Image (cartoon, grey):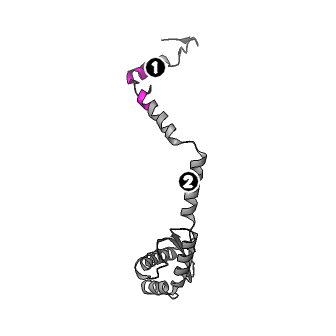
Amino acid sequence: MASRRTLKAASAIREVVSMAILTGIRDPRVCDVTVIGVEVTGDMRTAKIHVSIMGDEKKQALCLHGLKRSAGFIQSRIKDRIDTRFIPKVEFKLDEGVKHSVEISRILQDVLPDSQDDEADADSLTAEGSDHENYDHEDLENEQESESPPKIDSDTSESTED
């Protein structure tokens, strides 16, 4: 489990890296990048930065290469923000989470039946009205009285109806 110190450092590094990518890096290869998260080791010597890059495989590889080339610049920005004994070595990792979620949703759309038919059926049921909407509290009380268990007379041990 990560300590509070490493979690705070990871949050600060994420903020610094996001701003550096957005405003500081002038490399044209680095564009359409989102910093997903940062993992910092316990000794604060390594920071794995998970990024999501929009585009095809070629554009992602090119952008990731540009990010790795600008790691020194990003480390200097981290040094200005975080006062620690060691400045974490920055490693960029491509996060495939968004790509996997898009793929899963595509598979689900292929496998599951069209949900518009289900919604139309549900709308027709609510338009007709259901029994519980028209149910009166008096009806409930009458049902409870009629369904009450028979009373047992303790003297004769016979059941009597009301």
152 versus 121 height, above or below: above
Residue at 48%, 86% in the rendered image? 73
Q: Is 96 within the magenta?
A: no
Residue on which disc 2 sits: 105
Task: Name the foreground residue: 161 vs 52.
Answer: 52
Occupied quadrant, residue 58: bottom right
Nearer to us: label 1 or label 2: 2
Q: Which residues are magenta?
A: 125-143
Secondary element at image label 1: helix
Identify the amino acid type marked 2. Answer: Ser
Q: Is residue 99 above or below residue 92?
A: above
What percent of the width, then of the height, locates residue 15?
Answer: 43, 75
Counting other residues with Cα less than 10 Å from the Cα at mark 2, is it few (<14), some (14-19), or many (20 or more)?
few
Q: Residue at x 46, y 19 (%)?
A: 143
Residue 13 pos. (x, y %)? 47, 78
Q: Residue 80 occupies which quadrant of the picture?
A: bottom left
Tag of residue 143:
1
Of 97 and 133, which appears nearest the observer?
97
- The percent position of residue 50, horizontal first and vertical second, equals 54, 72
- Nearest to N terminus: mark 1 or mark 2: 2
Q: Secondary structure at mark 2?
A: helix
Position above or below: 34 against 140: below
Could you tell me the amino acid type at mark 1?
Glu
Instruction: Name the residue at 44% across, 34% down.
Output: 123
* Alpha carbon separation for disc pair 1 and 2: 48 Å
* Neighbour tally class for label 1: few under 14, some 14-19, many 20 plus, Cα within 10 Å: few
Instruction: State the image coordinates of residue 97 (x, y, percent, origin top left).
Output: 56, 64
Residue drawn at point x = 57 percent, y = 53 percent: 106
Residue placed most toward the observer, 91 or 159: 91
